[in-house]
């Protein structure tokens, strides 16, 4: 474990998110992590596709992590498709069949099942793309100037 705040040791869910983000990039999707679509919600990965499609992925590293999640259904109204990302030892029978499934590790992922597509309304899509862009820009700015205090 390191005391360096710039490079903390990644948690298991963050390692899954990294593999998911790498995989999505190979499908021409760009991603951000830990985006807040609405107060009280924070998605692990939001992906923006080449045609403006928005996918949300929640990374679960254990049974306890999944069973403790009470907010996931609130994410459905903020995306076109919803996925769980888990490692290959996760008991996938716990996951709802009507959602997407990704098996990931820190280096890559595989989409096992696409969740149903529920297209966002144009106004909601515009809001989400703006949130995505601002989030990505703030992250980039923070990486380039780590001593600067940035907003939410």
Image: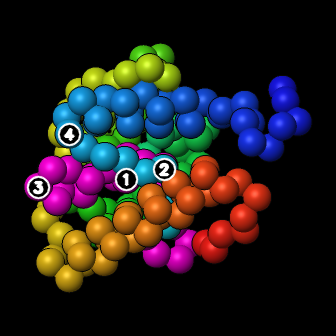
Whichever of labels 3 and 2 marks the residue nearer the N terminus, that label is 2
Whether the magenta-drawn stretch holds residue 39 is answered as yes
Q: Which residue is mark 2?
A: 33
Q: Which residues are magenta?
A: 37-57
Q: Is residue 37 left or right of residue 112?
A: right
Mark 1–mark 2 Cα distance, whole angstroms, equals: 6 Å
Nearer-the-camera pick, 61 or 45: 45
Quadrant in the picture for residue 26: top left
Which element carries disc 2, helix, strand or loop? strand
Question: Disc 1 vs disc 2: Cβ atoms closer than 8 Å?
Answer: yes
* Up/down of 32 relative to 21, above or below: below
Residue at far right of view: 3
Q: Position of residue 98 (x, y in %)?
A: 22, 47
Residue at far top of view: 89
Q: Would residue 91 be visible to someone looking at this image?
A: no
Mark 4–mark 2 Cα distance, whole angstroms, equals: 16 Å
Q: Quadrant of the N terminus?
A: top right
């Amino acid at each position: 474990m390191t005391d360096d705040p710039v490079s903390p040791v990644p948690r298991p869910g963050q390692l899954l998110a990294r593999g998911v983000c790498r995989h999505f990039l190979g499908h021409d999707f760009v991603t951000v992590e830990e985006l807040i679509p609405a107060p009280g919600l924070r998605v692990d990965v939001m992906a923006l596709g080449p045609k403006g499609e928005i996918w949300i992925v929640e990374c679960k590293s254990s049974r306890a992590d999944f069973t403790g999640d009470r907010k996931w259904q609130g994410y459905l109204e903020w995306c076109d498709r919803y996925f769980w990302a888990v490692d290959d030892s996760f008991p996938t029978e716990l996951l709802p069949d009507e959602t997407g499934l990704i098996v990931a590790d820190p280096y890559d992922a595989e989409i096992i099942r696409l969740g149903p597509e529920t297209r966002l309304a144009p106004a909601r899509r515009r809001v989400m793309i703006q949130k995505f862009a601002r989030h990505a820009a703030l992250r980039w700015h923070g990486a380039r100037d780590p001593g600067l205090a940035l907003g939410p």
